[in-house]
Amino acid sequence: MTELLGDPATVRRTSILDHLDRRTPGHSLPGVLYTDPEVFASEIELLWRRRWLFVGTVAEVPEPGDYLTFDVAGSSVLVIRDDDEQVRAFHNVCRHRGSRLVTAGQGSVGNLVCGYHSWTYATDGSLRYAPQLSPSIDTTCLGLRPVALREVGGLLYCSLADSPDDDLDAVAAQVRDYLTPHRLDRAKVAAQVDLVEEGNWKLVMENNRECYHCEGGHPELTCTFFPTWGLREDQVPERLRGDHDRYLLAEADLARRCDELGIPHRLLEDLVGRPLGFRIQREPLDGAGESFSPDGSRLVGRLLGDLADPRLGRCTFHTQPNAWIHLLADHVVTFSVTPISPDRTLVRSTWLVSADAVEGVDYDVESLTAVWRATNAQDAVFVRNTQLGVADPAYVPGPYNEAERQVDDFVRWYEAQIRSEARIPSPRGGSDG
Amino acid sequence: MTELLGDPATVRRTSILDHLDRRTPGHSLPGVLYTDPEVFASEIELLWRRRWLFVGTVAEVPEPGDYLTFDVAGSSVLVIRDDDEQVRAFHNVCRHRGSRLVTAGQGSVGNLVCGYHSWTYATDGSLRYAPQLSPSIDTTCLGLRPVALREVGGLLYCSLADSPDDDLDAVAAQVRDYLTPHRLDRAKVAAQVDLVEEGNWKLVMENNRECYHCEGGHPELTCTFFPTWGLREDQVPERLRGDHDRYLLAEADLARRCDELGIPHRLLEDLVGRPLGFRIQREPLDGAGESFSPDGSRLVGRLLGDLADPRLGRCTFHTQPNAWIHLLADHVVTFSVTPISPDRTLVRSTWLVSADAVEGVDYDVESLTAVWRATNAQDAVFVRNTQLGVADPAYVPGPYNEAERQVDDFVRWYEAQIRSEARIPSPRGGSDG
Amino acid sequence: MTELLGDPATVRRTSILDHLDRRTPGHSLPGVLYTDPEVFASEIELLWRRRWLFVGTVAEVPEPGDYLTFDVAGSSVLVIRDDDEQVRAFHNVCRHRGSRLVTAGQGSVGNLVCGYHSWTYATDGSLRYAPQLSPSIDTTCLGLRPVALREVGGLLYCSLADSPDDDLDAVAAQVRDYLTPHRLDRAKVAAQVDLVEEGNWKLVMENNRECYHCEGGHPELTCTFFPTWGLREDQVPERLRGDHDRYLLAEADLARRCDELGIPHRLLEDLVGRPLGFRIQREPLDGAGESFSPDGSRLVGRLLGDLADPRLGRCTFHTQPNAWIHLLADHVVTFSVTPISPDRTLVRSTWLVSADAVEGVDYDVESLTAVWRATNAQDAVFVRNTQLGVADPAYVPGPYNEAERQVDDFVRWYEAQIRSEARIPSPRGGSDG
């Protein structure tokens, strides 16, 4: 069968390229790309097992032995701070008979002890002890298998590729100064919420790339999130002119404050042309301009790091394929996206505050998380209804509006990455053994 | 791959024909036809996307802006009465990024506004408004995509084919006079119940095509449904002779009444030889002869339309692949069948009464629906147990009894339709874009 | 398609052999063998539809008309004691339109009446009556289809093969004398529990084949189950030396008692080289040495059969692919394993006591079942975590410890059976018609 048809992965790659050939530029993607299990398998192979993925922050593993897990496409990555304070990542699989090593999403350990037969690994991944093991077995070859991990201003990215590309390092050099003032290394987790959306991961990302739906769809968010986000000057509709004028004033004020503090704020964007499509910018918030609250005033009394000015708007860092992060003066909220199946996607939201902030005194979890819990729930409905529609045989891709430019950018990035990887017969390989 | 093996749909068609070649005439179908996902996909392509499907009644969309939705095989059909009182059908998919347009099963609107980005369509399907849309986009090409719809005496049928056959019109000409006295255009919905049965859609239809199982299986129904239904005179067993004699008397009485009122009642049947296999007949009910109640007396004080005689038995209209409808003097109950997966099928039951009947005065929903709720629940058990059995590798198709003649008719219709469509490389196409 | 690629079953067989070729001796199996639906389908075809499967005991069908059902791979087997006291097995499928005949897991009947159309079979499987059946139909050909069944000392095994191998008879001759003293023909069911474990059936069997995980994993069981089970003398670790010395004393005492009573106790084992891999041995229990209780004392006041000495340890009979059974003086507990899907497996546990024992007087169900309910629940966690891990692309098969010799035996038996059957184009056939 191999001679005539090629292996299944090759057939799949041909198939996803065929589908991309039928895409109309400037229009939403053909439905099959959101629904087909073979397309999904190709995406896992070509994107998710090869690109840098945002997995969490250093604030989630502050002490030696603290760990978190990140599950994607059947892989479970164990991110742990070792006894020398270095954050490392391993495949969460025992080297004996393959049991998951840790089963909680996060926790803290002295050593990593497998619950099945008590094989015991040090926090640096080496096999420290295995009961009754035959002396003929070389334990030095039985350490946990490492996963590539990088830190960027407190954000943790991993790659499941054996030889990951170095694009993350290039991006990190550009964005680090935007992130470091928020001192994620001195932050702590205030709340974390997992939401499974009933739609393809690309619909989740596309939904996040435009605010064309914000005005009607996100009443809580648009208290502080200017609804003309993504629009060019000449696209702002008359009825939003007042909002936009307020935005321009706020933007000028924010630029002045940032320049005084030496904090970068201008847009850096390379969404289409590189493996780690990204965008970063510091933008003003409406109202008091401090945080995601109904009136824009701060939600946490104690600001992050050494920040003194609460009015720093939101620095938003977006990376493709799987993250967007808002960094404010009083808190940070990160979002990671992971595909579960063609029509199910996990969105993990994590709110971080200063490690010194005291719950009940400096902040209230309910208030801190209210806007994005509501916004996520609204987006989940949009994504579910769109998934149902694009799966309908009657669906025909429609034209993107100019307000959806970044959706188009995402889709073009997606197409370029798939085309590029599908033609390379996996020189960098996946992490499969 | 195409050259050697043909496209997947062609391979599937070959496969379903192979299975049909192994069928023994006069016996139940081979198990694979009830269980295989590829067979199911062929049926969707060849039958469900090409035949006329019963979707509901005009009574469900009485006023302009009233709509219902009918979902089958990933398609959602939106049936709406437009501002000019015409009932139309559209694909329930926004032309922008594909979101489902309406998400409720029924409702009433002024315009059809997509919840995602507020694209707004008139009730005739034309795109009326889209926020911030680039002037370069031609909105006249962005109306909702139409679905073929026909009305037959108040019953609504749609076809997902681009160019549907005209068999429904031919059948309509024959049956319309049976239906119109019940005046569905002056009826209203008293109750609607969706039941998901855990079996293949053909088992649901086959179960409905015989009353061989009624005597033991449906105690509530056989209060008024004569248990010798489907039997020839010489097949009536001795112990049912009394029931059958009562049937013959009731039948003669019903014929006389109908003839006096000019209402047709004789059997019309063409179950095997045409795309829309059908059967219609007016038959007496046992007991008081008026309705599906324990003693046969009417369940609704106000009769339908201008009917004055409550003793009109049941006019039963059956259409293949997906409906049976009982029209009585006091109410109508419709059943639509839609496949969900090889082993799951939706049965929707809708009870209709005169628009002038008052709930709590003229009728009681609990009593009105009691017999068929019980009967449906019993049938769901039969269908589930049969699905489990035909999926067993040990299942061998067994012989149909003469009392199962209409089951055999259905099966022969099914085979003929599949054979006919599988050999035609889709000249009429599906509705896929 | 057939000419070029062979039929799907042949392709599947080639595929499972390819996977086995990649196995490293002495290591756990490649992950694909635990997760792939095609591998699973091959196992059903080559093992589960061809080997002898433990289905229950004569104690579960004590009287004529008593039946139990055993479901595996879409097949349902009806085991019934007929009116002549003979235990028989049939496919649980009506010969008419294929409905499941009995839907309860166990019960008692006079005749077997199908709930759908009242076709009625005698307990010997012959069709006794079918309402209104056409005289042209030969009912002698419409009896229930038989399934091969054998009894071994009260244990019931069936095979779905048309012409099963005779290995069960050969094993039966060797083990019958170990089993008969427990008189399952004079026992009754005290409790039965079904547990669905979230892992492949092989992980369930492998987990049962070693006590390497007992020390940390099964505190209730190791009260009486010596934790050095499966270890060679020179493998016993120092800290378990005391336990092991106690074991040696208990073993000598048990051997003496058995020899006096003429009950066989020595190990018989042929786990790798035959279709019905098996192992039987009588071993001492810790503590009082009588039963699976916290202190080892008996759990049932009335002993089984004519046994007078409660201190007979546990006679453990293991058969591959699907059973292990502990026979004690006061009770028997049987375990059957049946695959549901690649990652779900049913484990049925049945506790049997003397038919004369009185619940609440001679025994208490809660205490009787406590140890194995706890142990099964612990094993279900081990199996689930291992399934997750072996499904991870990062999983690499690890080395078996010497304490896992029987796991290696099981894996080698599995490989040998698959290789042997995959190369024979099904001369013995499955039971499919």
Image: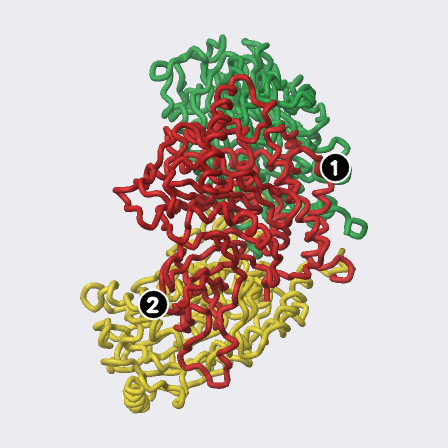
Chain colours: A green, B yellow, C red
- What amino acid type should be assigned to the residue bearing mark 1? Ser
Q: CA distance from mark 1 to mark 2?
A: 59 Å
Q: Secondary structure at mark 2?
A: helix
Q: Secondary structure at mark 1?
A: helix
Residue C382: image x %, image y %?
Answer: 51, 33
C36 above or below A371? below
- What amino acid type should be assigned to the residue bearing mark 2? Thr
Which is nearer the eye, A44 or A82? A82
Residue C251: image x %, image y %?
Answer: 49, 30
Q: Which residue is mark 2?
A: B375
Furthest residue in direction right, as rendered: A3
Q: Which residue is mark 1?
A: A420
Q: Is residue A28 visible?
A: yes
Chain letter, disc 2 residue: B
Which is nearer the eye, C166 or C91? C166
> In the visual, does A408 lie left or right of C244?
right
Query: In the rendered view of the protein, which quadrant contains the C terminus of chain A?
Result: top right
Residue B56: image x %, image y %?
Answer: 41, 66
Which is nearer the eye, A376 or B389? B389
Chain letter, disc 1 residue: A
